[in-house]
Image (cartoon, rainbow, N blue to C red):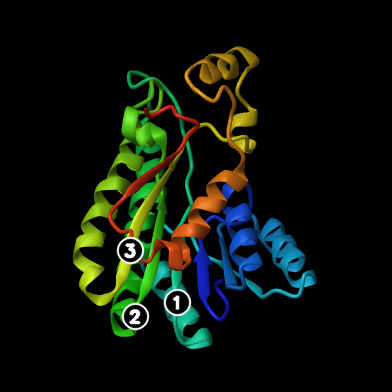
Amino acid sequence: MLTDKIALVTGAGRGIGAEIARTLADKGATVILNYNGSKDRAQALADEIAKKGQKAAIYQCNVSDFEACGEMMKAIVKEYGRLDILVNNAGITRDNLIMKMKEEDFDAVLNINLKGTFNTIRHISRQMLKQRSGKIINISSVSGILGNAGQANYAASKAGVIGLTKTMARELASRGITCNAVAPGFVDTEMTKVLSHSVKEAACAQIPLGRFGQAKDIAAMVAFLADEGGDYITGQVISVDGGMNI
């Protein structure tokens, strides 16, 4: 159980992030729900968690903003005295073929998905080193492992998250801090609902289990890593993808 643990989930307003927050709260953690533009959703989720007698708070921050991330971490430590679990889930897509991709679309995806992950870790690492404990869980993607046509920006950002994860694991392990990545495959969320039926069929054909995953599948793995079961796991990339990466 995660009783008395303080957890921050970035991009927690919807989809996988929201389900991760619910699952960590169910395990007893106090959950800080980071959002950028979806305050209503974040507040609704916080209210949902509170109705179950659990603890949640919301905090607005664009994770691509280095200084804003620093202020968020300072505020969390001031309020709660520590941060035990950091889940870097915030992410966006701006898909297109490389010959059509706009520079601003490449930059936007890298800034949120990769630099945002760096920003949060950078600003909380000193506190976790002081605590001599912490669980950092970064959400990567099967696209960052296999690549995916039309996702040069997204795949590059998620591959970068893997490199960052492994490096942070090496740097922080001596102080009892673990850092791992979870790499989802195709998951049934708002992001994949926009795909056409033919695209979904083609995607399912690549998945040995023959179906898209659910947000709860990703949340379960994050919760495992955050709890004591993940104490001796660090620097790993764990695919939750129905077998795509076999």
Q: Point out the image quarter for the N terminus.
A: bottom right
Q: Nearer the viewer, mark 2 or mark 3?
A: 3
Where's residue 35, x and y in %?
A: 57, 59
Query: Does residue 18 appear left or right of residue 102 in this picture?
Result: right
Q: Which residue is mark 3?
A: 232
Amino acid type of the residue tagged 1 in the rendering: Leu
Residue bearing mark 2: 127
Seen at 49% across and 58% down, the residue is 224
- The tally of labels here is 3
- Tell me which corner region of the image, top left, top right, bottom left or bottom right, holds residue 50: bottom right
- Looking at the rendered image, the disc whose residue lies closer to the viewer, 3 or 1, is 3
Q: Amino acid at mark 3?
A: Tyr
The picture places residue 78, in percent across and down from the top left corner, at 47, 87
Q: Secondary structure at mark 3?
A: loop
Q: Mark 1 and mark 2 in contact (Cβ < 8 Å)?
A: yes
Residue at the image position 55 percent from the left and 52 percent from the top: 220
Q: Which quadrant would residue 156 be assigned to in this image?
A: top left
Relative to 87, 179 lies left or right: left
Tell me if residue 243 comes above or below residue 130 in the rendering.
above
Above or below residue 90? Residue 73 is: below
Which residue is more in the foreground, 52 or 70?
52
Assess whether mark 3 and mark 2 are in contact (beta carbons under 8 angstroms).
no
Label 3, label 1: how many angstroms apart (C-alpha)?
Answer: 19 Å
Numbered label attached to residue 83:
1
Which residue is painted at 55% across and 81% down in the image? 4
44 to the left or right of 221 = right
Which residue type carries mark 2? Gln
Sequence order check: which comes first, mark 2 or mark 1? 1
